[in-house]
Image (tube, rainbow, N blue to C red):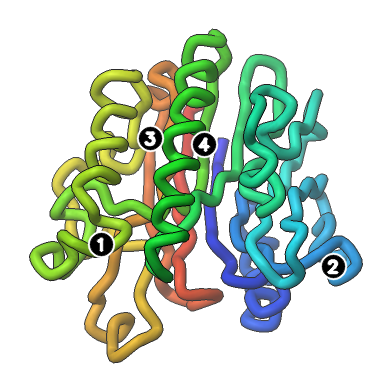
Amino acid sequence: MKIISLNLNGIRSATNKGVQAWLNKQDADIVCMQEIKAQAADMTAEMLSPAGYYGHFHYAEKKGYSGVGIYSKQKPDAVIEGLASNNDGVADIDSEGRYIECRFDNLSVISLYLPSGSSGEERQAFKFSVMTRFMLHLQALIASGREVVICGDWNIAHKEADLKNYKGNKKNSGFLPEERTWLTVLFDQVGWVDVYRKLHPDTTDACYTWWSNRGQAWAKNVGWRIDYQIATPLIAAKANAASVYKDERFSDHAPLIINYDV
């Protein structure tokens, strides 16, 4: 099973840059997308469901903002848009289109877009609030007995190896101690697995999935690893290959591709 995760930074922009043509060649079983930045009325037929795929989306209420989606070769048994069906007090998260889950037998694949806090204190406070509430959902998911793969832009670099300029970013959103500790708890205490790191425990420069549009970040590979596939232990153990595709650029993020022996 081949799963691709990619923050598109706008599905219309990424399509103009060739992402749909690239995806057509990948033969992926599942593609998880974040930051669609579109509503249903903005989507072409190819964007909604490329040839050979079922398309599923959770759009943000605000136009041109956020939104997540999943393409799947197999028709899901169930599709869950947003967190509200399993949780109370999450309307503010769901209004931003940050979570969609497709269920196939005992497997759930989720496309997730955690907020960024880089625009100011108010959004950082919202990010912390989302992290607190989402941790409860993550605990419930791992206790459910289902096999789960959560793909997405988590907007957190976990360790120093996960970004180029770690010394200069220790007080910046995305690398704050509280954010990094949250991921450590997720992995070391709750029991989730960072699949890329399981396969590539020592990789540094090659692991980055996002580059700022400022300066020469892409050209100099001054990047961050903030896109992850995080999975329950049994399916994580079946991962046999992971890579970040950088030969073409479809957005400010790069596709994360992982193969599972399933």
User: Which of 254 and 79 lies nearest the eye of the viewer?
Assistant: 79
Query: 10 Å neighbourhood of mark 4: few (<14), some, or many (≥20)?
Result: many
Q: Position of residue 36 (x, y in %)?
A: 67, 63
The percent position of residue 78, horizontal first and vertical second, equals 80, 26
Q: Can you give x and y, in whole percent of width and height, for residue 178 in the image? A: 25, 43
Q: Which mark is residue 206?
A: 1
Q: Disc 2 and disc 1: Cα gap in Å? A: 33 Å
The residue positioned farthest toward the bottom in the image shown: 215
Mark toward the start of the polypeptide (2 vs 4): 2
Camera-near label (3 vs 2) is 2
Residue where numbered disc 2 is placed? 43
- Disc 3, disc 2: CB below 8 Å? no
Mark 2 element type: loop
Q: Amino acid at mark 4?
A: Ile
- The local crowd at label 3, few if under 14, some if 14 to 19, many if 20 or more residues have their Cα within 10 Å, is some
Secondary structure beneath dot 1 equals: helix
Amino acid at pointer 1: Ala
Which label's residue is closer to the chain start, 1 or 4? 4
Question: Is residue 100 or residue 102 the one in the foreground?
Answer: 100
Q: Residue at x 62, y 68 (%)?
A: 22
Label drawn at residue 150: 4
Q: Which residue is mark 3?
A: 240
Compute the Cα span from label 2 to label 4. 24 Å
